[in-house]
Each structure stands twice: as C-alpha cells, then as structure tokens.
Image (spheres, grey):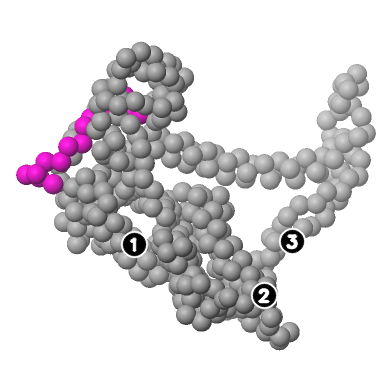
Amino acid sequence: WDAGKKEWVDKLNKDSKLATDVWAKKVQWRDYVTKARPTKVDKSSRKSSADKDSEYDPNAKAARNIVLQTFEGTVIDFLDHIEKQITSHIAHRNLVCTEHRSKKDYDHNSRPWTVHRDQDFAENGSIENFDKLQSEHWQKSQYTLFMAINSFLLVDEWNKTEGSLDEGNEVTVDGELYIKDPGDVHYRPEVNLNSFWACVKSHVRDDIYCVVDEEGIEHEVERRRLRLRKRHTICVAHVSDDMKHDRFAMKTFSIKELEDVESYMRENFPNDIPAGNITHLHLHSDNAATHFKSTGAMESFTSFTTSRGGTLKCKYIWSFGAPGHGKGFFDGMGGVFKNMIHGLIKKTKTSTGGIEGTASGYIESPQDVFDALEYRFSGEQ
C-alpha cells in the first residue's frame, strides 16, 4: 500500500485471505514520545568534551518532556510504527538479557576473598511537613540517598568438607580450598577450571548428595567435594544534604564505605579478609556519565588501590550495565528507607511522642533522617 498514492503497488493474489481493504482502514493509537523543551542556552556555549561531568541539579527541569500522543493512519501505518518501536526495544532487551546472563555466570563462579558491590543513587527523598501553609507546598526539603550492597562468600562455610547440606543449597563441585598463608597474606589458590556450580537436590546416603548443574544434569557427589556457597550481605545507605549527584559525592561515599566495610569484616569475619583490607573488589553500576562512567570517576576508582598495596596486590574491577530503572535490590532498600521516613513524619499527626532517635523529635533536615534511620537499624530498637 502506497500511502502517498493511496493505492496498492503490489497486487496480492485475489484468492489470498490477506487481499482485503482492512489494511487501508483508518485507525487511531496512542504512544509515548519525547519532546524537547524550549531552552535559552546558546549552542555555541556548550562544551564538546565528552569526559566533562555534568552536575546533577534536583531543581532543574528536564530538557525533554515525555507525553502521550495520539496518532492516526491506516493499519499499515500502525504496523510501521510498531516496527520502529520493536526495533529499538529488541536492542535494549538484548543488552538487558546479556547482562543478566553475565551476572548469573559471575554469581555461579565467584570465589571467596572477593567482595561484590552494587551501587546507585536512589531518587531523592522528600521531607514534607503535613501541617504546612499553602505557600509552603512549593518549598520541599530533600535529601540524597546513595545505596550500596556489599556481599562476599563465607570462606569458613566454603572450606567445610563435612556437615549436612539442605535442599536448595548452592555449591561448587570440586572447588579449591581457600586457606590463609601466614607467610603471604595475598596468596590465592589457582581456580580449578574443572569445577562447576550446582544446586543440592537431595541427600542420597551417608555423605553422598545429589546435585543438579546449570544444564539440569544430576550428579552424585561426595560431601568432601562440595564447597557451600553461603553469602553474607551488607546494605549501606549514605544520607546527605548535598543534592549534586556527581563523581565527587560518589568518591566520598565510596571511600568512607570501604573503610567501614573493611573494619566490619576484620571484626566479624577475619578469615574473609586475610590481608586486613579488601584486595579483590568487583564493583557494578549503571553507565550514568554524571557520577559513574567518566574519566574522573575512573581516576577516583583506581586510587582506591593505592592505600591497599597498589595494583600488584589488589584487583579492582568496575563493570557497567544497563540502567536498572528501580529494579535493583539496592533500589528496593532505598524505597524501604524513604517509605519509613515518610511514615514517621506522617505518624506525628496522630502521635504526641515525637520521633525517637532525633534531637528535635521531628524530621526537619537530612541529619534528622540519618538519626532516625540509624536509631532503627543500629540495634537500639
């Protein structure tokens, strides 16, 4: 069908079921489109450097608006529109699926003495006064919430060669043992390339277990050959009154967090940090250029190894993935924290006791947000 000439260019077989006028029928459909906002910025003032960090401004309006637009045309026009949308969506889905497979493969093959860290800025939280005047509705106080999830395999559980295993436990068959060498705290055993991930299905007899590998094949393996993959997870939330989501904020949060995580591991899991600091780190984030994927962020990341023995003794890797759009575990925890703060503020309308953990008994600033969260998650309550 030629939309310009309003006629069929290639005639269909008259006996075909597709040879109908339904293709030329007028239809309407709706789809989301982006439209540029008017701007006074002079194009000549824009810098062409791709490495320059753009500062995040929570009060700045987006350069584009997403609107729901109505389209009209023939059925063929509608199918052409769908084809364009699907073409770009397929590329996005391929990227997401590839990343998902890579993450699954990493989780199945990771080893002890390595810390995995996911990080991202959560959407800014709002500190809202429910008893405010009408004019105050236009003035909202906000706080930055930077979330990170650190996890590592427990080496004591990994090295066990006996003891019962439960159905559903993840194991590595014929995995190498990780035993600290007092003479060389940076020693790591060679990875057994013949080892493989599996999931415990059942206890067969004595010390024999039935496990299922990634391909669904069952194996009967002795307990001494099974390395239990038990992971310990640490959730870290950074609260700040700085609304700029840039690499400087990311660096500040990361430096402080790594020091705290190392101190926590030395105190509670000394066998999982034999060198006294994190020597192997796998960092994962999205590819936001404002605070992650830039030369400045890369320089900051490489400097983390300087105080830990340098690159000869530390292996730090940063992998970038597709935007999670709020689907990550750290996004869920950020939502829990913000929802808790919102509930505490709202609770003051029906309670006269104030908010425990805060100096003023109310949440009016990012410091109050931090105090309230620390009180509820530090074990005091």
Question: Residue drawn at (32%, 66%), measured in percent from left and top?
Answer: 256
State the mark number for residue 67.
Answer: 3
For the residues carrying marks 1 and 3, which lies nearer the camera in this image?
Answer: 1
Question: Residue drawn at (15%, 46%), measured in percent from left and top?
Answer: 186
Quadrant in which residue 162 is drawn: top left
Q: Which residues are magenta?
A: 171-185
Query: Which of the marked residues, 2 or 1, is nearer the chain's N terminus?
Result: 1
Q: Amino acid at mark 2?
A: Lys
Vertical position of residue 185 compared to residue 51: above or below? above
**Prevailing secondary structure class for the magenta stretch in the rendered image:** loop
Q: Is residue 182 magenta?
A: yes
Quadrant in which residue 127 is drawn: bottom right
Q: Is residue 374 left or right of residue 299?
A: right
Q: Amino acid at mark 3?
A: Val
Question: Residue drawn at (89%, 45%), measured in percent from left and top?
Answer: 27
Q: Nearer the viewer, residue 119 or 92?
A: 119
Mark 3 crowd level (few <14, some 14–19, many ≥20, 10 Å Cα): few
Quadrant in which residue 165 is drawn: top left
Mark 2 crowd level (few <14, some 14–19, many ≥20, 10 Å Cα): few
Query: Which of the marked residues, 3 or 2, is nearer the chain's N terminus?
Result: 3
The furthest residue to the left: 183
Residue 228 makes an appearance in the image? yes
Question: Residue drawn at (33%, 45%), measured in percent from left and top?
Answer: 152
SS state under label 3: strand
Q: Name the residue tied to disc 2.
A: 349
Q: Name the residue tied to disc 1.
A: 257
Mark 1 crowd level (few <14, some 14–19, many ≥20, 10 Å Cα): some
Which quadrant is home to the N terminus?
Answer: top right
SS state under label 2: loop
Q: Nearer the viewer, residue 256 or 25?
A: 256
